[in-house]
Amino acid sequence: MKTLIVLVMHGAPPTDFPRQELSEFFVIYGRMKREGGHGTAVNPRYAELEEKIKNWPRTAANDPFYTASEALAAELSQATGFKVVVGYNEFCAPDVATALEIAADEGAEEIVVATPMMTRGGEHAEAEIPATIRIFQEDHPKIKTVYAWPYDRAEIAAFLKQHISRFI
């Protein structure tokens, strides 16, 4: 069975994106959130700015988070032996839905979706990622898609304990 991993990362705006447009993006986003709507159908200018932010050229200088995310994906691929496709919740391309489609296009029979967002209660890990997976599964019922989440609190604590012990 051909297995691929989709690693879901948060994403961040590039530091060299025009400040005025970034401010405009967040003003529109805040307004839409307050009014209970969200999405490109609600505000075409929001959609335009979102696409521009997502597709802005990324470098280590203007988006160290993107660079670190891609490096983590490479390390995870080497550790598991599976190809890893990175998908971003926001601010970067590809988004999670597109990353799942990339995995499908590469012939995945099984996709394991993972994220380093470990704690419960976050909107991305708790709601948005599962919703995107459900839509993907409706379109691709023959591809086994597993969301490797939530994490066990005891395992998170053990991981953090081990990491902290290097600094004590």
Image: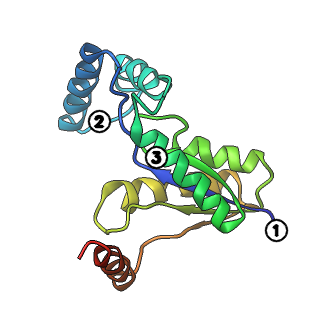
Query: Foreground residue, 149 or 31?
Result: 149
Cβ atoms at labels 3 and 1 below 8 Å apart: no
Is residue 90 visible to the viewer in this orientation of the structure? no
Q: CA distance from mark 3 to mark 1?
A: 29 Å
Q: Amino acid at mark 2?
A: Gly
Q: Name the amino acid, label 1.
A: Met
Front position in the image: 118 or 79 = 79
Judge depth for marks 2 and 1 and give the one in front: 1
Q: Which of marks 2 and 3 precedes in the sequence?
A: 2
Comes first in the chain, label 3 or label 1: 1
Residue displayed at 35% across by 31% down? 13
> Residue tagged by mark 2?
37
Compared with residue 143, is residue 102 higher up or lower down, i.e. above or below? above
User: In this figure, which residue is indicated by the disc labeled 3?
Assistant: 68
Residue 39, percent from left and from top: 38, 33
Residue 6 in which image quadrant: bottom right
